[in-house]
Amino acid sequence: MKKIMVMMLVAGTLAAMTACSKSKDAGETATEAALQKTEASSQTTGKTETAGQAEDKTENLALDAGKEQANAGFVVLPAYKYSGDDIYMNAMLAKFMEEKGGVFTQADVTIPDIVEVKIDNNDPQDIKVWNYARAFSFKKEGTELVAVDGVEVLGLMHMKETINGYEVISWEKAAYGDRNKVMKSLKKICDNDWNLVYDLVAAYRDSSLYHTAIMRMYVEENKLDIDRYTIKGKTWYLNDITTIEDEAESGFEGTFVQKKDDSSLEIHSLGNGSFSVKMSLSGLGDFAGTGSLEGEVLSFKLLSGKKESISCAAIREGDMVTVNVVQSDLDQLPEGSSFGFYSQTDTSTDSDAPAAIEAIE
C-alpha cells in the first residue's frame, strides 16, 4: 500500500470548470472532468487564497497544552505534532506555518496534512515536491471534531538539504477561482505535464483516506475520545480501515457503457495493480490491452485487431470513468480526445447525460 504522507495543507479551492473545446493536450480533459465538481469557493469551514493575499498574522495554529482562550468556549486539546518518518515533512510544515498559520480562524486544534503527489530529489539543492496541502481548525463536540475553518493549497515546494536538515526555499502555489487561471498555473507548476496536473487535482478532489489516517494518528497518540470528524458537512469515521489500494481498484473494476450508443469499457483487476482493459467504440471496433494503476489514474495501452495502438489515461469520478487519449495511431481518435463511460448499473438514471467529456479551453 502506498505510504501515507501527512501534513499541511493550504490554498487553492479550484473553481468548477465547464467543458469547452475538443482535442487539447492529453490529460487536460481528465483534469476538467475532475474540476467540474469542485466548489467555486470554500463554504463554512474552508478558505482559499492566492500567494500574497494572506494577512500578516502570527497566531499559533493550536492552543498550547494547558492554555485557555478567554470567552471562546473552546476545549483545550493537544497541539498537533508530526510523528512520522518522512524526511521532508517537518520542513514543509515549517514553511506552511510560516506563510499560512494566521489566515484562518482558530479553534480547539488545527490538524494539518500534506499529500506528496510527486517527488524529484535528483538535485539535493533543488528537491521538488508537488503536493496538496491543507489545514483545518476543529472544535470538539462530544466525540466528534468539527471543522470551523481552514485553508487548502495545490503547489510545488522547492527544498534543499542543509547541515541542519531540509529547508523549503520557495513555494509555487496554484491559482484558484477562474478556470483559465487555475489551469494556466497548474500547467506551469507541472511543466506542461498533464498527467501530473491531473494527479494534483485528483489529490485535491479526494484524499479522504490520507486525511482520515492523519486524524486517526492524532487521536490515538493523544488518547482522545474522538471517533469521527466533519469537514464542510461531510463526516468520516476514524475506524474506517479501507485501504487506498482497495478503494482505487474497486473503483475501476467492472463494465462501463456510454448512454447514447453501444460503446463500452471493461476493466478487470489482474492483481498487483495491473488490469486487463477492453474498450469498444461505436464505429471504430474493439481495442484490448493491459494497464496499471498509479495513485488514482489508470494508464493503459490498447491494440485494435489491425494492430493500431492507443495509449490512454482514465479517471473515475463517481459513476463515470473518463478516458483520455494520450497517444493514437488513428485519425478518428486524435490525441487529446476523450470519452465518458458510466457504470452499467447506472445507465437508466440519467438519459440526458453527455456521452463524452470535452477538453477545457
Image (spheres, rainbow, N blue to C red):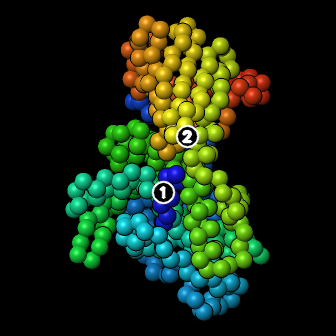
Res. 104 mark: none
Tell me which numbered mark, 2 or 1, is placed earlier along the sequence.
1
Residue that mark 1 sits on:
3
On the question of residue 24 being in view, the answer is no
- x, y percentage for residue 238? 68, 64
Residue beneath the point at 55% across and 40% down: 34
On the question of residue 287 being in view, the answer is yes
Q: 288 or 323: which is nearer to us?
A: 288
Disc 2 and disc 1: Cα gap in Å?
A: 24 Å
- x, y percentage for residue 123? 22, 56
Q: 262 or 41: which is nearer to us?
A: 262
Residue beneath the point at 48% across and 60% down: 5
Q: Amino acid at mark 2?
A: Ala
Q: Tell whether 310 sits left or right of 39.
A: left
Q: Amino acid at mark 1?
A: Lys
Q: Is residue 33 above or below residue 352?
A: below
- x, y percentage for residue 66? 60, 92
Q: Is residue 232 above or below residue 26?
A: below
Q: Nearer the viewer, mark 2 or mark 1?
A: 1
Q: Residue furthest front?
A: 271
Q: Quadrant of residue 125?
A: bottom left
Residue that mark 2 sits on:
34
